[in-house]
Each structure stands twice: as C-alpha cells, then as structure tokens.
Image (cartoon, rainbow, N blue to C red):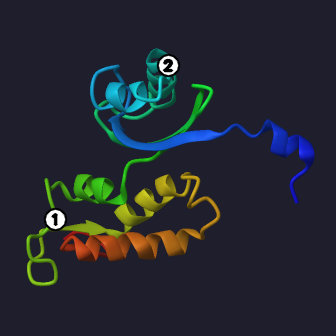
Amino acid sequence: MSTLKEILTRRPVAATIRLTVPAGGARPAPPVGPALGQYRLNLMAFCKDFNARTQKYKPDTPMAVTITAFKDNTFEFIVKSPSVTWYIKKAAGVESGSSRPGHEVASTITLQHVYEIAKVKQSDPYCQYMPLESICKSIIGTANTMGIKVVKELD
C-alpha cells in the first residue's frame, strides 16, 4: 500500500520517450532535440547528463535510453547497455546477420563471446536479477535467429 505522502509526491507523467542515441553523442539536434523539445524539457541538461553517463563506452555505441517526462517539465532517464544483436554483430565481425537464418551461417562466435556479452547485459536494470546462465541461453537464441553459429572455440 502507498502512503499518503508517496501519493502526494508523485509527479504526473507527460510521456515516456524511447530513443537510441550514440554513446557520448547526445546533441540538441535530431533525434534528441525534437523528441524532448515537444515536452519542453531542458535539452542541454539531458545532453550533458547522458554524455557523462555514457563516457565509459566507445563513441558511436548505440545506447537505448528511456526518458520519463513529467508535466512540470522535469525528466528522469535510464540508460541501457547496447542491444544483444549489436554485441553479437561486433563479436562476429559482420554488418548484419544471415539473410536466411537456419539455412545460411553468416558467421560464428564462441561461448566466451556469449559469456562476455551476458556479463555486460547483467548490469541492465531488467537483467540484474536473472541468472547468468539464463542470459547466456537468451543470447545463444538471438545469435541463432541471426544466422550466427555459437561454437565452443574458433578453429
């Protein structure tokens, strides 16, 4: 049950905005500017904060960000690590997966790659309570649907 104080301090939400922004590359230009501008949010505050939070990543790494815009023109945001498909493509050294997954193998990655990706994804808010084994199985499934084969070790 919520207390009266919690109910009174809740701010009404104007919108939830989902964007993919390159790490350290948030600028008031599109796609960030128009998305935040329509809710009268402080663009420069978002850009500075986002760039500071993503400075440990290599530039141009696509970061998923979920921004909660409140009616009083304030906002909060959560930055997620890059998508599993992006990591798999980087590990496999390919631009895209197979055009015919299940029939053609685009590339291969090792179980070590899968484990490393799982360790990074475990820091995501939605995966932090999942066992590493479950995250690894999910990553292997994603790789299979992309037409990328997972092997014990490269020959």
Which image quarter is the N terminus in?
bottom right
For badge 1, the amino acid type reads Gly
Q: Nearer the viewer, residue 74 or 155?
A: 74
Give the image location of residue 122, x and y in percent: 54, 58
Image position of 73 (left or right of 154): right
Q: Is residue 64 visible?
A: no
Which residue does the image show at 16% across and 83% down from the upper left? 102
Q: Badge 2 is on which residue? A: 42
**Residue extending furthest bottom?**
103
- The residue lying at 90 percent from left, 41 percent from top is 5
Asked if 66 appears above or below 47 in the picture, the reply is below
Q: Identify the residue shown where x is 18% and y is 74%.
A: 147
x, y percentage for residue 145? 25, 75
Mark 1 crowdedness (10 Å alpha carbons): few <14, some 14-19, many ≥20: many
Left or right: 113 in relation to 14: left
Task: Determine whether 78 is above or below 40 in the image.
Answer: below
Dot 1 lies on which element? Answer: loop
- In the image, residue 66 sits, relative to residue 23, either above or below, namely below
Q: Residue at x 9, y 77 (%)?
A: 100
Secondary-structure class at tag 2: loop
Q: Nearer the viewer, mark 2 or mark 1?
A: 2
Q: Return the residue at label 1.
A: 97
Q: Residue 9: give x, y in percent of width and height.
A: 80, 37
Q: Amino acid at mark 2?
A: Asn
Question: Which image quadrant: the C terminus?
Answer: bottom left
Which image quarter: residue 54?
A: top left
Mark 2 burial class by Cα count in 10 Å: few <14, some 14-19, many 20+: some
